[in-house]
Amino acid sequence: MGRSASDLGTGPGSSPMFDTTLRIGLVALLVYACARIVLPFASILMWSAILAVMLYPLHLRLAAYLGERWSALLIGVIGVALMLGPMVIVVTSLATSLYSLVSSVQSHDVTMPSPPPWLDGTPLVGKKLTEIWTLVATNLPAALKQYGHLLSGPLAWLGSFAGGLAIGELSFVVSFAIAAVLIAFGKGGAEFARRLLARVTGSTARAEQLVTLTAATIRGVGLGVVGVALIQSLLLGLGFFVVGLPTAGPLTLVALLLGIMQIPLLLLSLPVVVYVFATEATQTAVFFLVWNIVVGLSDNVLRPLMLGRGLEVPMPVILMGVIGGVIVDGLLGLFIGPVLLAVGYVLLVEWLQQHRAGSRQRPDEPAR
C-alpha cells in the first residue's frame, strides 16, 4: 500500500511488450496524421525536390557572386520565365484545341470528307465503318442521335483532361517557388538526408554514398532525359506555332511524351512535314523541314552536354515511369514518374550489388 506512483510502472504487472506496442502505435498514429496533411502536396513537393537537386550545382556557382538567397531567387524567377512560360502557351493551345473540338461536335459544325474507297473492302469491319463514316459526313445530327451515347464518355474525359492541364500549370508555378526555397536551404536539406539515411543504414559512409548516388541519378535522368526532351519539344513546338499549325499545342505535348520515352521525334515530325509541304508555300515548307532536321540532330549535342556522368537507366524503366506518372499525377507526373522510378531502380541495383559484395567478403566457416 505504501508504494509510490513511480513504482507502479516497474512492478510485476508492467509488460515491456505492451510498452513497445504502445510506442509503435503512437508513432504510427503520428505518421498517419502527418501523411494525411502532406499527401495532397506530395506530387508538388517531389517535383520541387527534383528541381532543387537538378539546379543546385548552378546555385553554387551563382552564390559565389550573388549570395545564397539572391541566387535562389534568381534561379526561381528565370526558371518560371524560361520553362513555365512556353509550357503555359503549349498547354493553353492544347486546351483551346480540345474546347474547339467539343464545341464543334456539340454545334454539329464538324465536316468530314467521304470515306476512302479501300475502307469498304476491309474484312469484317469495312462495311460498318464505311456506313458510319458516310452518315457522319452527310448527316451529322442523325449520326449523333444514333451514336451520340458512345461519345459521352470520351467528351467527358476530354473536358476533365483540359481541367487537369490548368491545374498542372498552377502546380508548375508552385513547384518552382518551393524549389527556390529548397535551393536556398540546400545545405541543411542535404545534411538532413544524410542524418536520416545514417539512422536507417547505421553507417555514415553508407548514407553519404546513397545521397550522392540519388543526386547523381536525379540529375542524370532529369537533365539527360526529361531536360533534353523538354528542350527538343519546345524547339519543335516553336516551329509548329511559326508555321501556324492549328494543332501546334497537342503536337508539342506529343513530342514531349515521345522525347521522354526515348522514341525518335522523326516519327512525329515526318508526317507533319509532309502535311506542311501539301498545304503551305514551298519556301515555308523547306524552312520547316530544315528546322526539324536541326532539332532532330540537336539530340546529339544536348544529351552528352546535359547528361554528363549520369547513370544509365533502361528504357523500360523510363517508359513505365512516364506512363505511370501520367496516370497517377497527370501533367506533373510526366516529369516526376521517370525520375522517381529511375532513382528507385538505381538504389535497388546498388543495394543488390552491395549485398553481393558483402556476401563475398564473409570469412569461410571453420572446417569441422
Image (cartoon, rainbow, N blue to C red):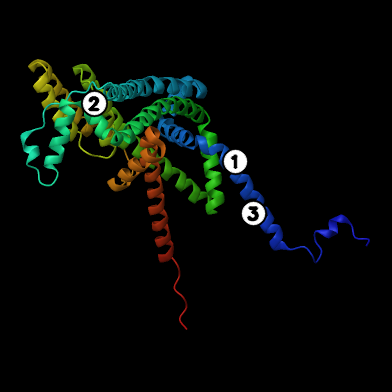
* Residue type marked 2: Pro
Q: Which residue is located at x 32 percent, y 40 percent?
A: 309
Viewer-nearest of discs 2 and 1: 2
Picture coordinates of residue 256, whole percent (x, y):
28, 32
Query: SS class of the residue under badge 3?
Result: helix
**Residue topped by disc 3:** 24
Picture coordinates of residue 5, whole percent (x, y):
86, 55
Mark 1 or 3, nearer chain start: 3
Q: Nearer the viewer, residue 367 or 26?
A: 26
Q: Which residue is located at x 30 percent, y 22 percent?
A: 103
Alpha carbon distance from label 1 to label 3: 15 Å
**Residue topped by disc 2:** 141
Most distant residue in the right direction: 2
**In screen coordinates, is 336 left or right of 257?**
right
* Residue type marked 3: Ile
Picture coordinates of residue 47, whole percent (x, y):
43, 34
Q: Which mark is residue 34?
A: 1
Alpha carbon distance from label 2 to label 1: 54 Å
Mark 2 or 1, nearer chain start: 1
Q: Nearer the viewer, residue 354 or 80?
A: 80
